[in-house]
């Protein structure tokens, strides 16, 4: 990457952070960082962890929700490298419950779910690509009905029952964003014989020097945790003091369960920028990284808009509407240059409480934007993130 004038970059990004934390439609607080292949080149904080409370700081702990997915995916890729995981074998070989799963075809007149056996077995490749058939109850009406009428627990409970759900379609037939990566975590646990958090600690976090990140927070992490806020229809914010992901959950959810700080996630982003290498040890082989970042959906499978069927948890949401998007292992890949300047072939994703990241391996730059607001697709936070990313690419062009 060309040298960016870091003072100019900091000025531009500080302005973005200041703007989103002011005014009637503000976000409570934000931490945002940018890294090149060697080091963090920007770190900014603005606003408060909780409205009227402690200020945001770089070491604030966030529920990172679906930005957990790429870390669980990395653990699965390591299993592939070691010859322990065949991506195209039935995933039930590693996570036996998947052999019992059925397809939800609809509901009978009395409201009973109509279920049948799937036509093919689920594979781990399908789980990693979100083509296995699992969904989320905040993005899918059928799952929402299962939750509302049949007691299907929310995934935020961290319970096993919340992922032991029917499929929405036969494995491999379409793309649907859902609990697939939670099941990838169960595959990894079946292979390693350890809980996913232990595997992440041994094989990702410790090699990369990532300390403040875990499924279960230490007391010190709890004291630095930002509060999730609810955005009202009038753009007001209400602290959700009783809402949090469980510490020591029944299942270590590979799809959404981690707490962490932004500086720790930057170390993970740098590993992907450096072809799988950390500062002192290698996490993935370069050849694994090379294929893992490529879009792998088979047409007519495609990444689609996420319909917000539960307005308390998500708005309708989509990155770069109208532009082509693919899915890799386990990131979204934009197949055309984005309006922010993100080039085709870059990877990234988001977390439910409006956290966003991207990794541009060609330019050697990546970033993370962390807020704690529901529903997902918050107009102030999401637009602020896009402004943040756009400012980085403007600085690159001007360098």
Image (tube, helix red, strand yellow):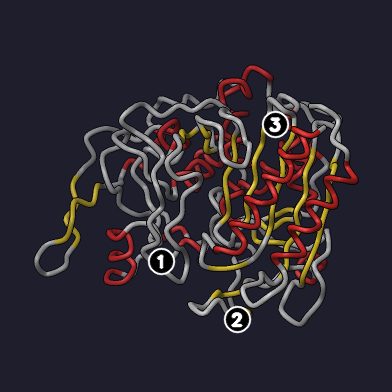
Q: CA distance from mark 3 to mark 2?
A: 36 Å
The residue most toward the top is: 287
Element carrying mark 2: strand
* Residue under pointer 2: 238
Q: Which mark is residue 314?
A: none
Q: Nearer the viewer, mark 3 or mark 2?
A: 2
* Residue under pointer 3: 272
Asked whether 127 or 5 is in front, the reply is 5
Where residue 259 sits: x, y (%)?
A: 68, 58
First reached walking from the N terminus: tag 3 or tag 2: 2
Could one spot residue 252 in this view of the protein? no
Q: Does residue 269 lie above or below 282 as drawn?
A: below
Describe residue 167's horizontal placement relative to residue 61 as left or right: left
* Residue under pointer 1: 153
Give the residue displayed 23% in from the left and 52% down from the top.
104
Q: CA distance from mark 1 to mark 3?
A: 34 Å
Could one spot residue 16 in this view of the protein? yes
């Amino acid at each position: 990457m060309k040298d960016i004038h870091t003072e100019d970059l900091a000025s531009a990004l500080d302005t973005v952070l200041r703007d989103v934390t002011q005014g009637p439609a503000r976000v409570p607080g934000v931490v945002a960082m940018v890294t090149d292949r060697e080091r963090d080149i920007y770190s900014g904080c603005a606003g408060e962890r909780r409205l009227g409370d402690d200020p945001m700081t770089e070491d604030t702990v966030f529920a990172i929700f679906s930005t957990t997915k790429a870390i669980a995916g990395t653990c699965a890729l390591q299993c592939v490298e070691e010859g322990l995981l065949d991506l195209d074998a039935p995933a039930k070989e590693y996570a036996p419950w998947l052999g019992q799963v059925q397809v939800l075809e609809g509901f009978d007149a009395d409201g009973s779910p109509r279920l049948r056996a799937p036509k093919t077995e689920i594979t781990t490749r399908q789980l990693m690509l979100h083509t296995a058939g699992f969904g989320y109850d905040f993005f899918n009406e059928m799952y929402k009905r299962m939750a509302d009428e049949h007691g299907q627990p929310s995934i935020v409970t961290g319970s096993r029952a919340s992922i032991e759900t029917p499929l929405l379609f036969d494995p491999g037939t379409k793309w649907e964003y859902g609990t697939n990566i939670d099941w990838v975590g169960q595959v990894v646990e079946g292979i390693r014989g350890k809980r996913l958090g232990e595997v992440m600690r041994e094989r990702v976090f410790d090699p990369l020097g990532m300390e403040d990140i875990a499924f279960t927070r230490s007391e010190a992490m709890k004291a630095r945790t930002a509060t999730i806020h609810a955005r009202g229809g009038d753009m007001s914010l209400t602290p959700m003091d009783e809402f949090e992901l469980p510490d020591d959950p029944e299942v270590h959810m590979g799809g959404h369960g981690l707490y962490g700080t932004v500086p720790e996630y930057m170390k993970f982003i740098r590993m992907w920028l450096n072809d799988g290498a950390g500062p002192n040890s290698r996490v993935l082989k370069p050849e694994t990284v090379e294929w893992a970042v490529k879009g792998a959906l088979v047409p007519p499978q495609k990444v689609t808009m996420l319909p917000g069927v539960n307005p308390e948890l998500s708005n309708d949401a989509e990155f770069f509407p109208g532009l082509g998007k693919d899915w890799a292992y386990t990131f979204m890949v934009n197949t055309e240059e984005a309006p922010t300047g993100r080039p085709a072939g870059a990877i990234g994703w988001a977390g439910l409480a409006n956290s966003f990241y991207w990794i541009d391996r060609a330019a050697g730059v990546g970033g993370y934007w962390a807020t704690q607001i529901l529903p997902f697709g918050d107009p102030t936070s999401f637009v602020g993130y896009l402004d943040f990313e756009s400012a980085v690419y403007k600085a690159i062009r001007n360098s």
